[in-house]
């Protein structure tokens, strides 16, 4: 490169001896400017693999690039131990791990870090939001940057380097449960310069101003690595048309072809030599591998071929550690193919000293030959100048051409957002030892919400205890209309309810009658459990639900109390987190907080009066009463069980309680009687009626006495 240029200059000034001196000076400058050639800069693929080896070269980044970086400091894994269960439940010990580490990104200052991927999945979005809990600090590589406080605390004051001039990122106590309890492979979208960078600008900075840039192509991002400017620039010059030549006492880098200078045949001092290489020896296909800016900086490939392609005899393949768009990469491939095909022609000319100003990299036109041609080498002899030329294409810089990146394989970048929390007391789940079982359902105002950490209090907020983490995001929202009252024994084919879901990622599906009988599409509207067969999309996040089964699992008592704005929840087992309330807490209140990544210092809060639905038997059904001929009143009913909602074997459902017991309450004008019985029936005798002074209308209610709670009443009025 520089050696070649200065050899020609020395020969022009001092003949063969001057040429030797010029070569010596050029080699010294070449060594100082470009360095040794034993090691090369990063190639495609090097930037996507995270390393932690001594001696690994850290690239200087320009523009915007995605790099894995080099781990320069890390702690050992930190193990945390937690226990759950006990008091009749299996005891479970769980282990979780975290780690702290620093990752070097660029050997020159940067502006910012955008997205971050962990094992290929988004850890940090373009809005700067993290998808998993993380404490993150960025050191931009300024010459006055301070020591990271975590590294200083671990290594000791005065023992921790500040890594000035090196841009690096620090993760403090990065929780590893999302990554299989191991440190994930991290890649970073690094913004070193906020705009595309010209290749000449890159070369000028790397050479500390000793290379003066002319008009050169620009790239969206570039990773300059290796030991020298040579390795950094040559990786680009291998693909992009560039020329480095001595101009006016300075090394100037510019596009390969400038304004051509015409050479008349009369100027030639001897017969010209034209050499044409065989077509079979020239590539008929060129492929350029690069980082595709439109595919999250994943590796892309663009090809150019002679004819239809696909059966290339001789393919030229190049990898460029630069970020481009498909159109620019395609243009480079076509330009290189055109240049290689044009380069089949080479020429040797003999001229006089009048043309001694010509330099390698200059473009010329030769009379009688199609052009242009580029000077590859010039040698000054005794009153003569010999030029070695190669045929080049006419364009100096390739213009973008139509191309496509292909279908991107990328993860949706959704902001986590704030948490929406619902605390439920439902006849679901298996409670133990008389402890009411509450259920927490959570989602987010944004479709990017993932999870939140739960705390629970049962003493008015005086003490908060760990309650685990939320389950999968629930499908929840609000009812826009009031659901009318209806019978729980038949399909409700008349009533409808319109609901609006919390975010655009949520959806409701229809279900057949058979699927509904099997339990499909169970939902909570207000306090009533219903099932829906039809879900008509109304646009946006709104649905109209119809073909309903009402009062499921004994919640028919809530069928008449609906109002617009009440909560809606699709009840799915994998979206519910069970929280045990203390024994004897029925009648009290539970409070639960949910703190997610998007909640900041204001976690979501929910409170619920504890009614113990999970340990309460459902109210009896088919309650009836009739007056007998002897004046007695015969009362009967059918029990239900909280452990037997499906009639699987055709037999009676299991009792689900330690004993069968009921409380019958009979009231009338000015009297009331309470009777406990152990069978599903009672006779209110004429004698008891006379003792109570009963006459006229009777109000009758029956409750089942459960082991830990009493059912809601079944009621009737007997005229």
Image (cartoon, grey):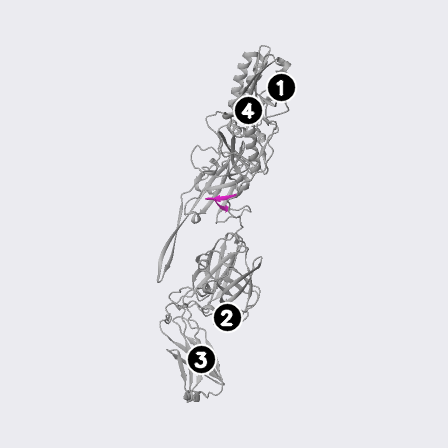
- Please indicate, yes or no, whether residue 107 appears anywhere in the rendered image: no
Q: Residues within 10 Å of mark 2 (few under 14, many from 20)?
A: some
- Residue 368, numbered circle: 1
- Residue 178, numbered circle: none
> Which region shows up in magenta?
115-123
- Please indicate, yes or no, whether residue 547 appears anywhere in the rendered image: yes
| N-term mark: 3 or 1 | 1
Q: CA distance from mark 4 to mark 1?
A: 18 Å
| N-term mark: 2 or 3 | 2
Residue beneath disc 2: 558
Q: Position of residue 608 (x, y in %)?
A: 49, 65
| N-term mark: 3 or 4 | 4
Nearest the eye: 184 or 146: 184
State how many labels appear: 4
Q: Please, is residue 514 above or below residue 302 in the view?
A: below
- Residue 343, numbered circle: 4
Pick the quarter of the image with the N terminus: top right
Q: Position of residue 375 (x, y in %)?
A: 58, 20
| N-term mark: 1 or 2 | 1
Provide the secondary structure element on which disc 4 rests.
Answer: loop
Using residue 258 as the reference point, say whether residue 150 is left or right of it.
left
Nearest the eye: 484 or 434: 484
The mark closer to the camera, 3 or 4, is: 4
């Amino acid at each position: 490169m520089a050696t070649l240029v200065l050899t020609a200059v020395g020969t022009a000034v001092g003949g063969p001896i001057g040429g030797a001196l010029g070569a010596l000076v050029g080699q010294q400058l070449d060594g100082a400017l470009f360095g040794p050639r034993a090691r090369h800069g990063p190639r495609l693929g090097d930037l996507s693999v995270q390393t932690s080896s001594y001696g690994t070269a850290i690239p200087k980044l320009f523009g915007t690039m995605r790099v894995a970086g080099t781990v320069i400091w890390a702690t050992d894994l930190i193990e945390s131990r937690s226990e759950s269960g006990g008091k009749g439940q299996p005891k479970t010990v769980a282990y979780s791990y975290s780690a702290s580490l620093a990752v070097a990104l660029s050997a020159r200052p940067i502006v910012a870090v955008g997205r971050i991927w962990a094992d290929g999945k988004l850890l940090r979005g373009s809005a700067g939001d993290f998808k998993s809990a993380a404490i993150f600090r960025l050191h931009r590589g300024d010459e006055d940057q301070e020591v990271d406080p975590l590294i200083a605390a671990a290594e000791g004051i005065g023992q921790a380097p500040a890594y000035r001039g090196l841009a690096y990122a620090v993760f403090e106590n990065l929780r590893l449960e999302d990554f299989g309890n191991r440190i994930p492979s991290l890649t970073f979208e690094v913004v070193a310069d906020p705009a595309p960078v010209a290749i000449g600008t890159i070369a000028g900075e790397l050479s500390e101003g000793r290379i003066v840039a002319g008009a050169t192509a620009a790239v969206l991002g570039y990773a300059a690595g290796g030991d020298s400017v040579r390795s950094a620039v040559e990786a680009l010059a291998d693909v992009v048309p560039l020329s480095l030549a001595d101009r006016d006492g300075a090394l100037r880098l510019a596009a390969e072809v400038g304004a051509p200078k015409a050479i008349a045949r009369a100027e030639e001092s001897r017969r010209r030599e034209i050499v044409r290489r065989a077509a079979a020896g020239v590539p008929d296909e060129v492929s350029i591998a690069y980082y595709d800016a439109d595919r999250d900086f994943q590796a892309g490939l663009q090809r150019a071929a002679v004819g239809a392609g696909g059966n290339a005899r001789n393919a030229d393949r190049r990898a460029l550690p630069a970020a481009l768009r498909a159109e620019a990469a395609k243009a480079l491939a076509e330009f290189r193919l055109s240049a290689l095909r044009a380069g089949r022609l080479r020429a040797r000319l003999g001229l006089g000293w009048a043309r001694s100003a010509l330099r390698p990299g200059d473009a010329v036109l030769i009379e009688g030959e199609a052009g242009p041609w580029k000077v590859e080498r010039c040698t000054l002899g005794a009153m003569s100048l010999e030029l070695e030329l190669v045929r080049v294409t006419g364009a100096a810089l390739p213009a973008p051409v139509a191309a496509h990146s292909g279908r991107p394989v990328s993860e949706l970048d959704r902001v986590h957002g704030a948490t929406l929390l619902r605390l439920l007391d439902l006849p679901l789940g298996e409670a133990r030892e008389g402890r009411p079982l509450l259920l927490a359902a959570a989602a987010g105002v944004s479709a990017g919400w993932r999870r939140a950490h739960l705390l629970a209090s049962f003493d008015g907020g005086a003490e908060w205890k760990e309650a685990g983490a939320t389950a999968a995001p629930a499908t929840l929202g609000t009812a826009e209309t009031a659901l009318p009252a209806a019978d729980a024994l038949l399909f409700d084919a008349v009533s409808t309810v319109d609901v609006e879901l919390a975010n655009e990622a949520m959806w409701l599906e229809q279900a057949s009658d058979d699927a509904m009988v099997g339990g499909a599409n169970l939902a909570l509207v207000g306090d009533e459990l219903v099932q829906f067969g039809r879900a008509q999309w109304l646009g946006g996040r709104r649905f109209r639900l119809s073909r309903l089964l009402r009062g499921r699992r004994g919640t028919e008592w809530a069928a008449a109390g609906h109002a617009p704005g009440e909560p809606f929840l699709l009840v799915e087992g994998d979206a519910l987190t069970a929280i045990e309330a203390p024994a004897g807490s029925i009648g009290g209140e539970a409070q639960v907080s949910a703190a997610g990544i998007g909640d900041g210092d204001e976690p979501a809060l929910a409170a619920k009066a504890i009614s113990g639905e999970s340990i309460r038997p459902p109210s009896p059904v088919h309650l009836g009463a009739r007056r007998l001929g002897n004046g007695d009143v015969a009362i009967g009913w059918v029990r239900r069980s909280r452990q037997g909602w499906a009639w699987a074997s055709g037999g009676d459902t299991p009792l689900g309680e330690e004993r069968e017991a009921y409380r019958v309450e009979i009231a009338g004008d000015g009297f009331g009687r309470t009777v406990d019985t152990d069978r599903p029936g009672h006779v209110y005798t004429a004698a008891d009626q006379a003792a109570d002074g009963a006459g006229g209308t009777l109000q009758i209610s029956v409750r089942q006495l459960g082991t830990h709670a009493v059912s809601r009443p079944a009621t009737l009025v007997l005229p």
